[in-house]
Amino acid sequence: MMTTHEVCELLRVDRTTLWRWRRAGVGPVPVEVGPRALRYRRAEVEAYLREHQGSR
């Protein structure tokens, strides 16, 4: 599982961008691991990255 910070570094986006994507239903889907904690499955993040390489 990856933290928001780790996902942002890997995707090279700001935390705010990741938050906006999440609200719009875009990007890798987070998993709630606590009342205020989100994590991302590494395989999902890497799949998203592969699918969207070159689109930025």
Image (spheres, grey):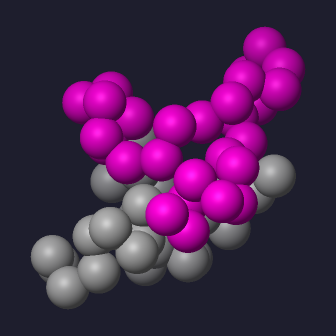
Question: Which residue appears farthest toward the top when viewing the image?
Answer: 35
Percent across and percent down for residue 53 are 29, 80
From the viewer's perspective, is 56 left or right of 26? left
Residue 44 appears in the picture as rendered: yes
Residue 8 shows up from this direction:
no
Residue 25 figure quarter: top left
Residue located 15% across and 76% down the image: 55
Extreme residue in the left direction: 55
Q: Is residue 36 above or below residue 30?
A: above
The residue shown at (17%, 78%) is 56
Q: Is residue 31 magenta?
A: yes
What is the magenta range?
Answer: 21-47
Residue 27: % across, % down: 37, 48
User: Residue 4: x percent and y percent?
Assistant: 64, 53
Residue at 39 percent across and 35 percent down: it is 22
Expressed as whole percent of the image width and height from the top left, the position of residue 42 reads: 70, 60
Left-right relation of 12 to 29: left
Near-viewer residue (29 or 14) = 29
